[in-house]
Image: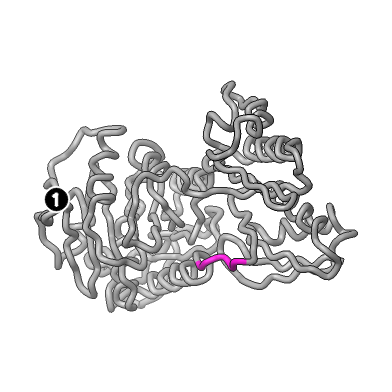
């Protein structure tokens, strides 16, 4: 950091639960001062909301203690420590569930093939080091994976320009007992070192569970969003909810859920039969119901995709177009801050604005922030307009009275 040592002392005085401080821990990344506004960039990905909120407010108080600090602006830094760089990939989406056997690979392959058939440049990465099944569902690709002149693994190409890498074609199908860092290292070597062409989206088929490869991938790979897959069984739903929580704690947006194998179409009369009557809720914005379908199991996705996979592909495209679009230059991106801290920052921005001025911000939960803002700063508030829609938040225009 370029700041002088004496300007960092108020931040070093903050004691974190493990006895360290925000400077040594790397939470406070950068401090900028401009005409009385002190901007502090912080990295709080992966912290629980209560702890993150406490740290943010302590950092805000420390910044106010700096000389000439009339106004403090806290800016969250996302993906600050991601070690896997994918320079030719625009967006990364995971297909995940802690429960095995729910159809993650079927959904991942079907989604990848369907998006590719719709003209999207797609990469498909099989992160299941323990049971890589993607190659079995992509019948038009055949290994082994070769390397280019730089020693990078070259993805195999399927129909419609879909590129794929999997341990199943890079290292054979033999069972593996690799765990922890060794298992993730095998995944990272393929994903991060792969010679991917320019891709609009990379879909990662995650293994079951919430540790080893999954935890390491969330820590090191810049995952933008996730599709969660479950069956209607209570155990599967509970495990998938834990996966949703794990991804949320790591700053990954929920794109959609897929409830798999909750129904089937009778081969005699064509009537759809539901196996479970109770609705399934896994705490995601959009849920798609995928019936059991023999054709889908054999060759998921492509130009003859299932209607549910088509709907899922539309949800994913909307997420990419609306949620992951660039934040306007005149807007503050508060995503990543706890909701209470987002409201506090908005209140501060309103207080520093002139009457009639509009502050534009991007937040994850616009309704919650809007209600809290009306409660906490109603006397300053003239109007709140939602200018954009998104699965993980919205662009708000907040006008001072």
Q: Residue at x 61, y 27 (%)?
A: 16
Q: Is residue 347 found inside the magenta-colored segment of the image?
A: no
Q: Based on the displayed image, in which of its 4 quarters is residue 386 positioned? A: bottom right
Taking the image as drawn, is residue 71 in sight? yes
Q: Which residues fall within the magenta stretch?
A: 325-329
Q: Report which residue position mark 1 lands on.
A: 151
Residue 209 position (above or below residue 387): above
Q: Position of residue 5 (x, y in %)?
A: 60, 30
Residue 141 position (above or below residue 22): below
Q: Based on the displayed image, in which of its 4 quarters is residue 297 positioned? A: bottom left
Q: Position of residue 112 (x, y in %)?
A: 31, 66
Q: How crowded is mark 1: few (under 14 residues within 10 Å), some or many (20 or more)?
A: few
In the image, taking residue 46 as reference, residue 311 lies left or right, namely left
Taking the image as drawn, is residue 234 in sight? no
Q: Residue at x 19, y 68 (%)?
A: 158
Observer-nearest of 250 and 43:
43
In the image, taking residue 136 as reference, residue 6 lies left or right, namely right
Observer-nearest of 189 and 225:
189
Q: Residue at x 53, y 70 (%)?
A: 322
């Amino acid at each position: 950091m370029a700041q002088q040592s004496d300007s960092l002392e108020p931040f070093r005085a903050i004691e974190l639960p493990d006895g360290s401080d925000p400077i040594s821990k790397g939470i406070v990344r950068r401090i900028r001062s401009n005409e009385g506004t002190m901007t502090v960039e912080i990295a709080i990905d992966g912290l629980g909301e209560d702890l993150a909120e406490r740290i943010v407010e302590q950092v805000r108080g420390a910044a106010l203690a700096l000389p000439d600090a009339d106004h403090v602006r806290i800016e969250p830094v996302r993906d600050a420590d991601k070690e896997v760089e994918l320079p030719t990939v625009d967006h990364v989406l995971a297909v995940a569930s802690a429960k095995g056997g729910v159809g993650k690979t079927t959904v991942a392959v079907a989604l990848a093939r369907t998006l590719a058939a719709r003209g999207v440049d797609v990469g498909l990465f099989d992160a299941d080091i323990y049971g890589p099944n993607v190659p079995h569902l992509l019948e038009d690709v055949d290994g082994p994976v070769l390397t280019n002149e730089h020693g990078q693994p070259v993805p195999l190409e399927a129909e419609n320009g879909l590129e794929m890498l999997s341990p199943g074609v890079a290292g054979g199908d033999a069972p593996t007992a690799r765990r922890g860092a060794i298992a993730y290292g095998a995944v990272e070597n393929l994903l991060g070192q792969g010679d991917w062409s320019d891709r609009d989206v990379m879909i990662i088929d995650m293994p079951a569970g919430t540790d080893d490869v999954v935890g390491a991938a969330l820590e090191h790979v810049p995952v933008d969003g996730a599709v969660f897959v479950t069956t209607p069984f209570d155990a599967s739903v509970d495990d998938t909810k834990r996966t949703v929580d794990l991804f949320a704690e790591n700053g990954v947006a929920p794109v959609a859920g897929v409830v798999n194998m909750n129904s089937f179409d009778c081969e005699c009369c064509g009537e759809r039969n539901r196996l479970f009557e109770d609705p399934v809720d896994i705490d995601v914005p959009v849920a798609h119901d995928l019936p059991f379908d023999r054709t889908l199991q054999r060759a998921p996705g492509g130009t003859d995709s299932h209607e549910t996979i088509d709907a899922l592909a539309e949800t994913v495209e909307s997420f990419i177009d609306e949620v992951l679009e660039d934040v306007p230059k005149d807007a503050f991106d508060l995503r990543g801050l706890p909701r209470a801290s987002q409201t506090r920052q908005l209140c501060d921005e309103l207080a520093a604005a002139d009457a009639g001025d509009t502050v534009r911000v991007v937040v994850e939960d616009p309704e919650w922030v809007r209600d809290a803002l009306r409660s906490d700063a109603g006397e300053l508030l003239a109007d709140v307009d939602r200018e954009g829609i998104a699965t993980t938040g919205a662009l708000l225009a907040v006008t001072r009275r």
